[in-house]
Image (cartoon, helix red, strand yellow):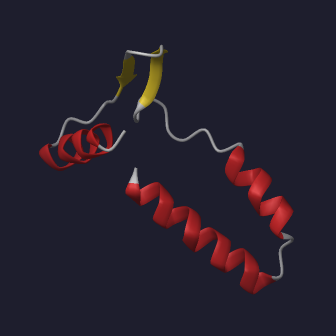
């Protein structure tokens, strides 16, 4: 979701400041799998998308629904 984008941007900025090669940063971000059961795809087809999300707090559930709504 949005927080992952913000975290990725912060990582890119820090890596740039430290002089890390951008290609390495891009490969690392591309291979990032995220946390288990946090909007984890379970089934994808052209018409249906099923995700597993452990969100159990109202704030987490709201973030999950916002992300799902933006797809």
Q: Is residue 48 left or right of residue 20?
A: left
Q: Is residue 5 above or below residue 18?
A: above
Q: Is residue 64 left or right of residue 52?
A: left
Q: Position of residue 71 (x, y in %)?
A: 37, 38
Q: Position of residue 4 (x, y in %)?
A: 47, 55
Q: Residue at x 78, y 83 (%)?
A: 18
Q: How many marks?
A: 0
Q: Residue at x 50, y 39 (%)?
A: 35
Where residue 16 sits, quadrant-wise, is: bottom right
Q: Is residue 66 above or below residue 16?
A: above
Q: Which residue is at the far front?
A: 46
Q: Is residue 32 above or below residue 52?
A: below
Q: Residue at x 17, y 42 (%)?
A: 57
Q: Nearer the viewer, residue 33 or 23?
A: 23
Q: Position of residue 60 (x, y in %)?
A: 23, 45
Q: Which residue is at the far bottom?
A: 17
Where residue 15 sits, quadrant-wise, is: bottom right
Q: Position of residue 66 (x, y in %)?
A: 24, 46
Q: Is residue 54 left or right of residue 22?
A: left
């Amino acid at each position: 979701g949005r927080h992952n984008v913000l975290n990725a941007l912060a990582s890119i900025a820090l890596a740039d400041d430290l002089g890390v090669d951008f290609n390495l940063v891009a490969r690392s971000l591309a291979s990032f799998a995220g946390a288990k059961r946090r909007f984890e795809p379970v089934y994808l087809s052209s018409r249906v998308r099923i995700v597993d999300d452990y969100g159990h707090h109202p704030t987490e559930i709201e973030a999950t629904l916002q992300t799902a709504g933006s797809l």
